[in-house]
Amino acid sequence: MELLILCFIALYVIVYRKNKGQNVYRFIVGQASSLYEKYAPYSFKSVSEKAKELKQEYTVRQYTTQIIIFAGGGFVISWLYFYNILISIMYCLIAVSFIPYLAYLRYKKIYSEFIFEQIQVYTTNTIMEFSVTESFVKALEGVYSSGVLEDPVSTDVRHMIDLAYENGSIDESIAYMNGKYDYYMVRNMHQLFLQVTREGSKNAAKESLDNMLLDIDTLVEGVYTDRMNRDTFHKSFLQYGIMLYLLVMLVQYMLGVDTYIGLLEKMPIVKLLLHIIIAVNSYFLISGEKYYNENVGAE
């Protein structure tokens, strides 16, 4: 612990010496925010705003219900483990503190589903527009002006069009979109358009574009099937996770409640082990929730 404190102080001094005219706290926060925006797919602000726009944001009533359920669940479970009012109150507060994080996971799921649907619309409509205009940029303009896309995808398509006119080619536009939306169907469609643009084989590409439309339909069907399977698994997972918490009741049944309480009072190591069991079970549940809400629509 002492070593960690010394390392933190040394880091603070180094940052302070390198940024004398700047508030160190703001510098650290700024750097952390930059790293988050660089490596995290979506910020909480973005996903919560989109959930609100799609009318899927939690209401005050839903938040209140969650607080009651989490606080009540934390109290009951911890009471069954320790029979201590102070410890139960502590676990109540810990359980409630996870609600914002779980809300963020849900919003991220909603956002990723929305993005996937928008990418599906983008690829399908671009291919159909290209079959008429025989120009990738004109196809993009047709999709953009049709109003079928919503932000942020709509704004990104507008940026692609601007890049194409600025550079006189579609290479940078395609690189931008591939980097922003790393989907199999996006990369394949763009690669095909690059080949058509460079080789001029528009007639030969028609069959490939038709096949790509079928591939997109198959992919979308698979993604929606995966969502239904995830929902079914999620319900079973939560039931299993709750049952893990309640295994302590089986232990008390075999030992007897009085004997169990006696062990808690006489052997502090038992309390420590119980805290570890709760922490492990909680980590298991939260990891499962994270998995359930992530990579929705991923290929």
Image (cartoon, grey):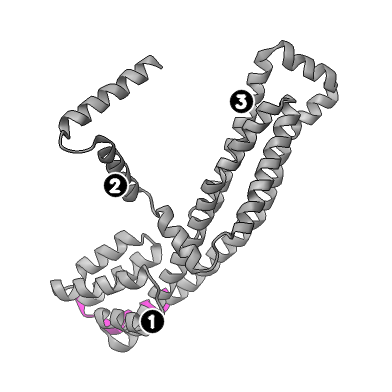
Please give the range of residues in magenta.
198-212
The residue labelled by disc 2 is 34
Secondary structure beneath label 2: helix
Could you classify mark 3 by the number of other residues whose Cα lies within 10 Å: few (under 14), some (14-19), or many (20 or more)? few
Q: Quadrant of residue 62?
A: bottom right
Q: Quadrant of residue 249?
A: top right
Front-most of residues 149 and 122: 149
Q: Amino acid at mark 3?
A: Ile
Eyeballing the image, is 72 above or below 43?
A: above
Going 47% across and 59% down the picture, which residue do you hit?
48
Give the residue pinned by disc 3: 276
Viewer-proximal residue among 32 and 162: 32
Mark toward the viewer: 1 or 2: 2
- Residue 61, image x, y percentages: 64, 58
220 sits left or right of 252 in the view: left
Label 1 sits on residue: 147
Amino acid beneath label 1: Gly
Magenta-drawn stretch contains 208? yes
- Tell me: residue 21, above or below residue 113: above
